Image (cartoon, grey):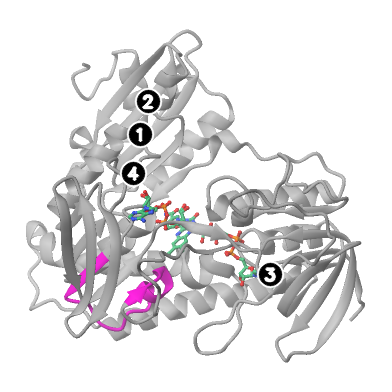
Amino acid sequence: MSDHFDVIVIGGGPAGYPAAIRAGQLGLSVACIDGWKNRDGTYAFGGTCLNAGCIPSKALLESSELLHRAHEEFALHGISTGPVSIDIAKMQKRKEQIVKGSTQGIMALFKGAKVTALTGHGRLLPGRQVEFTAADGSQKVLSANHVVLASGSNPTSLPTAVFDGKHIMDSWDALDLTETPKRLGVIGAGVIGVELGSVWRRLGSEVVILEASDTFLALADQQLAKEALKHFNKQGLNIRLGAKVSSATVGSDGVTVAYQDASGEQSLVVDKLVVAIGRRPNTAGLLAQGTGVMTDARGFIEVDEYCHTGVENVWAVGDVVRGPMLAHKGKEEGVMVAERIAGHHAQVNYHTIPSVIYTAPEIAWVGQTEEQVKANGRAYKVGNFPFMASGRARAMESTAGFCKLIADVETDEILGVHIIGPMAGELIGEAVLAMEYSATTEDLQLTMHAHPTLSEALHEAALSADKRAIDFINR
Ligand code: FAD
Ligand code: NAD
């Protein structure tokens, strides 16, 4: 192996590995260094997303949702079964196989793009040199024309509830539970809190989620957030807002969590406690003295809109830089950087990053919330369509939620789309594409949608923005 590459990528998660593959496709010589170590001691590329994030969480959401449907919905279809139960060990094994298949897939993709995969730790040295410490401890200094930093993020810890991996857990521990805890506490009602809370609730846990903010899903359109909270409460997710945790103590009865809310001091006893209060950029051991790469007050590597650090030919992408911590955002940044390195003029449209929360009902949005549009002082119109009025949703027995579209009154340009309901994460794709092309409400109105499909909800919401919806009474 040569010690010099056109590009060295440090980090093989969903930001780093696409950067490496795209650079390889463009004919550059590439090495991608990744040090992710699984709990069984094996190493795997794919980062948080494939090993302990997006993929395993979606596998468990799917299994637990099927169980829930078997309990709650089969009878409605006239399907009778014997007693329905779930084997948690088998469920976890399925998840592990999905993870393994996905991470092994990266190796095949690397081979196809002629990317050299290096397992171990990478540290940027001055002058675009990289110190590589292999898994066996041996060290080597590599050099590159360009270095891409893609070291991701780690869970934020809470000094008052220190992770012990057994009783006080992070999201990775919570994905790997081998039995259903009777009482599960979660600190943080963010994306992880509601997704993992939903998994274990459906599998039988009593779930209490303590959220410090008085506002539920503060980043989401608040009409959507209120609808979500209503459904989550109905499902038995006990979400307590304005709850400030002061301590968590492990004892013989489980974990006792002391917190304060509007009514005063409170206490909660649970068998397991998950802390999911956000994630922090991971730059531990990444930057040697004198590289010139800067981090901001919160530890994110500073970059411009093209993910360049300001140090010649050193780039950074994904969770370790500003912006939402989402796999697809990191992927687009990785691809953009690879293309810019190859001399192309790629860019990322940061205004059309979709967000999806994979609960039931599913939640998805793109663009501005109604609160943001209002704060910007823009004259706007809103179209709404309830899934109750969708023939397909009714056939699916999934009528909760709605599709909401916000557009500029004068230009008719779509400013944001917010969906809570069946397959919202799939439906949002059309809205992203529409906004990418600066579509107007009229463009969507004139686009034919197949019947009966869930996608008609977006069509009807667009029509409703001009009070011309067909399938429900315009308000
Ligand atoms: P990471 O995925 O964290 O990858 C960074 C990699 O770099 C890791 O393998 C790390 O070990 C390695 N590394 C770090 N430093 C070094 C070094 N010095 N040398 C060598 N290797 C190093 N996002 C979504 O878009 N959709 C979802 O459904 C979703 N679900 C999630 C569920 C959970 C439970 C969690 C925790 C996160 C979820 N996310 C989801 C967020 C998503 O996982 C992250 O946004 C994404 O993984 C970030 O990609 P990244 O490549 O920047 O970093
Ligand atoms: P988050 O930012 O989504 O939510 C954290 C929540 O914890 C917030 O509501 C915050 O107000 C609350 N909080 C903060 N400090 C607290 C405290 N001391 N006590 C109680 N509550 C507190 O973060 P997360 O849920 O940990 O997820 C981390 C990241 O992973 C997110 O940025 C998210 O984008 C990503 N993720 C994405 C998906 C997805 O795309 N479906 C799924 C999981 C995770």
Discs 1, 4 touching: Cβ within 8 Å: no
C-alpha span from label 3 to label 2: 41 Å
Q: Residue at x 51, y 30 (%)?
A: 434
Instruction: Find the magenta span and give its range.
Output: 168-185
What residue sits right under mark 2 in the picture?
A: 370
Q: Residue at x 33, y 68 (%)?
A: 274
Residue 262 placement: quadrant: top left
In the rendering, at what x and y percent does residue 304 appear? 73, 41
Q: Residue at x 34, y 45 (%)?
A: 363
Q: Nearer the viewer, mark 3 or mark 2?
A: 2
Among numbered discs 3 and 1, the one appearing first in the sequence: 3
Mark 3 surroundings within 10 Å by alpha-carbon count, few (fewer than 14), some (14 through 19), many (20 or more)? some
C-alpha span from label 3 to label 1: 38 Å
Residue 14 placement: quadrant: bottom right
What residue sits right under mark 3 in the picture?
A: 109
What residue sits right under mark 1 in the picture?
A: 221
Mark 1 surroundings within 10 Å by alpha-carbon count, few (fewer than 14), some (14 through 19), many (20 or more)? many
Among numbered discs 3 and 4, the one appearing first in the sequence: 3
Image quarter where the N terminus lies is bottom right
Q: Is residue 440 left or right of residue 241?
A: right
C-alpha span from label 1 to label 2: 6 Å
Q: Nearer the viewer, mark 3 or mark 1?
A: 1
For the residue pair 297 and 117, the one nearer the viewer reads as: 297
